[in-house]
Amino acid sequence: MNQMQNIEHSEYPQQGSGLTVIVPAYNEAASITDTIKSIQTQTMPPEEIIVIDDFSSDNTGELARKCGVTVLRPPANTGSKAGAQNFAMTQVKTPYVMAIDADTTLAPDAIEKLMPALDGPNMAAACGFVLPRHVSTLWERGRYIEYIFAFTFYKPIQDYYGKPLISSGCFSVYRTDILRANKGWSTRTMAEDMDLTWSFYQAGYGVRFVPEAVCYPIEPHDFHFMGKQLKRWSHGFVQNVRLHWKGVLEIPFLRMTVAVALWDATVASLAYMILLPLMAIFISPFFLLGYLIDIPAVVVPVLYTAIRRREVGLALASLPGFFVLRLVNSVFLLNALWLEMVVHRPLKVYEKGH
């Protein structure tokens, strides 16, 4: 069936921003309207918004059409977010294209803050600051601290050296010609955004992180959905290491960043889950103090951001959730390493994380 079928042209006014926003959506009726409205009310609106209704069984497409945006519906589910985004690329006519998850809303000036980052030479992509939209359950609180820590501490350092580890898939902007030269988003791993970022680096392009550009995705609220997301992310990371390791070794700072992530996934995880408990049991309970090593390193940057955002109470109440999530993260990463690298059972089925 021709991919041009089922296209409904946008009624959204042209703004001359040179930007098209694509929103992959599968059964996102609960959030798609809020996402579209947050894009339409930007201080720098895009020229077009394209929603890919990826063969949803709910009324995602109908709700998107009511917002007056372009809606594409493939003849069958594409099987992944990357597939849905690639389906829309034939309709992109602007020099810049932005990908936003269907459960993600933007701060009013997010696009205006993000776009200038692509002005530099050889810049292929730029990403913004990510914060959970809802912070109430244990898992949402853990993710809230995880994001504050990562985007306040790790990401600025990575950006300083010109090598953010990943241009986040929930909110990133790209040069259309460079993205097309890369043949869009690859479906060969479970982490298409990491795959794309590392491919850009190996091709000689740059990626920027802009902390002033803020987005708010809906994060998994319980263990069932968090487990699906962590499984996909963990396998995706390991798959990308296997795929890109030779290229990564040739890029100094990226090489170090990936090495630290692998260390954290293996040695640190094993120490947290096995070594420290065994030493506490057989040698001395004082070895349990090893669990406190991370606390100052995490609390300082988290509180710095929380004070600026006037969310100190929320941050302090969410810290236990972070350490629970860190432990669960370790289990999923070790399992992914075992399945992908040792027994060669790669994850191939893409499952939504909420």
Image (cartoon, grey):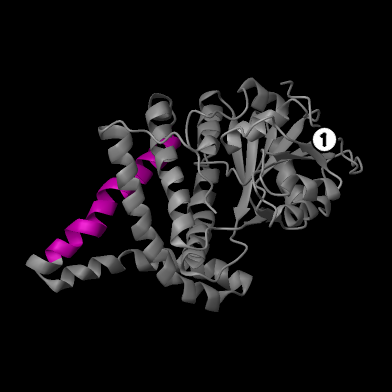
Instruction: Compare residues 76 and 48 and report the one nearer the observer.
Output: 76
- Determine whether the residue tagged by mark 1 lies in a helix, strand or loop: loop
Above or below, comparing residue 338 to residue 214 in the picture: above
The majority secondary structure of the magenta stretch comes to helix
Q: Position of residue 273 (x, y in %)?
A: 24, 58
Q: Quadrant of the C terminus?
A: bottom right
| Left or right of residue 317: residue 122 | right
Residue 213 percent across, percent down from the top left:
68, 53
The quadrant in which residue 151 appears is bottom right
The question of residue 255 being in magenta is answered with: yes
- For label 1, the residue is 18
- 327 or 110: which is nearer to us? 327
Is 295 magenta? The answer is no
Residue at 54% across, 47% down = 352
Outermost residue toward the left in this view: 282
**Residue 124 visible in the current orientation:** no
For the point 38% across and 68% down, the residue is 296
Between 26 and 170, the one nearer to me in the picture: 26
User: Residue at 77% across / 57% down in the picture?
Assistant: 108
Span colored in magenta: 252-279
Question: In the rendered image of this protein, does residue 95 appear above or below residue 233?
Answer: above
